[in-house]
Image (spheres, grey):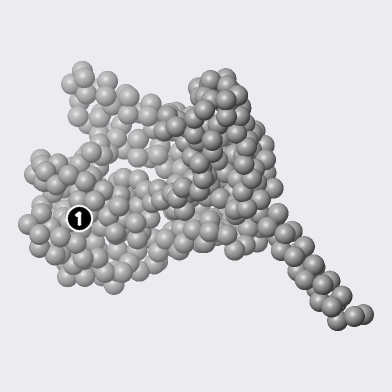
Amino acid sequence: MHLVSRLFLISLTTLLISCSQKQEKSFSISGMIPNFKEKFIVLSVIEDFQQNKTSVIDTLKINKRGEFNSVYLLEPALYTLTFNEEKTILLAIDKEQHIVVKGPDLETILVTGSNDTDLLNSYESFREESLNRLVKSVRNKIKELQKTSSNETEIIAMRELEVSNYKKHLNELTQFIQEKMGTSIAVYATSTRWNVTDNLNFYKDLVVKFEEKHASINITQKLKERLILLKKTSIGSKLSSIEMPSVSGEIIKLDSIHKKYTLIDFWASWCPPCRTESKLLNSLYASFNAEGFEIYGISLDSKKERWINALEKDARIWPNVSTVEGFKTKVSMEYGITSLPTNFLIDSQGKI
């Protein structure tokens, strides 16, 4: 074969392979919203779901008939569509999906064409139902008890039930993932509520299977990072040193104060179960501090005054620290804290 012909065939083959690879990653978004004509829709990708980091990808112009259409060569991920800053919807998009958004107005739009988005919506509906049934129902009962000045012991018991039921809620979410979601892109949106205590092995297997199906994409790496966080806070793991400021600004190192047993207590002034737990912690501290028990309180408050008031009102006399950054506190993010109260009991070597 002539050299030029051979080079042409090689170039053509390379071009076809390249186009094929890009096409595998492509997806489209189209739709019609008649009462939303001549406006804009912003498409963004969620780069980090836990830290709520997003990047704008494109602005879709809606024509006079309320129609829009665009094709993207982007990898599978979680995306958002924001309609003129009035409404935002979350999408879980895999390759070669064709998303269609239709409805007469923003309140009645329907999204089709993505099984992953359907699974995400099903998960969110179940999550809300489970939370209402197990947790919010108990919170409402507590509010009613507080209105009638009921026995404090009864309220404390209900707070304990709230914490116990929240664990059941997380386990129900895990069961939903296990039974219905497989390795869908939507799994990434569930990762902030993964329950390490009872389900670490399941999530290990899930991440392995997810990577087998979705290798070399950003959310696979994020799920692997989330799993690392879960392993860091599992029983038997050793916590690294923590250094944070007290109310006075003094840096208190965990290594300098931990004893035979130390309870690392993540809490906040705005968290009712945390405030109720204060009484139990006070009792434990009074009974066992002299025998080698310490508490290292880490507040995830975002307002210093509220943190200080809660410390005084709840008589939290053990070492307490905070950078007053809420859930964006570095230590909170390092250990994947997504709910309060969260506690870790470590021994004298720092092992959980």
Q: Is residue 116 visible?
A: no
Name the element at disc 1: loop
How many numbered circles are shown?
A: 1
Asked which quadrant contains residue 305, the reply is top left
Q: Is residue 139 above or below residue 316?
A: above
Q: Nearer the viewer, residue 111 or 15?
A: 15
Could you tell me which residue is drawn at 51 percent across and 53 percent down?
A: 199
Binning the other alpha carbons within 10 Å of mark 1 as few (below 14), some (14 to 19) or many (20 upward) gives many
Residue reaching furthest top?
A: 148
The quarter of the picture where the C terminus appears is: bottom left
Task: Where is residue 76? Give x, y as percent.
Answer: 60, 52
Residue reaching furthest right?
A: 1
Q: Nearer the viewer, residue 6 or 36?
A: 6
The quarter of the picture where the N terminus appears is: bottom right
Kind of residue at badge 1: Thr
Quickly name the residue at label 1: 323
Q: Nearer the viewer, residue 299 or 10?
A: 10
Task: Where is residue 320? Give x, y as percent.
Answer: 16, 55
Could you tell me which residue is drawn at 19 percent across and 54 percent down?
A: 322
Task: Where is residue 149? Give x, y as percent.
Answer: 18, 21
Task: Where is residue 27? Give x, y as percent.
Answer: 65, 46
Q: Is residue 352 visible?
A: yes
Q: Is residue 155 above or below residue 185?
A: above
Could you tell me which residue is drawn at 53 percent across and 56 percent down?
A: 219
Asked whether, in this view, residue 105 is left or right of residue 297, the answer is right
Asked whether, in this view, residue 25 is left or right of residue 92, the answer is right
Could you tell me which residue is drawn at 31 percent across and 38 percent down?
A: 160
Asked whether, in this view, residue 307 is left or right of residue 57, the answer is left
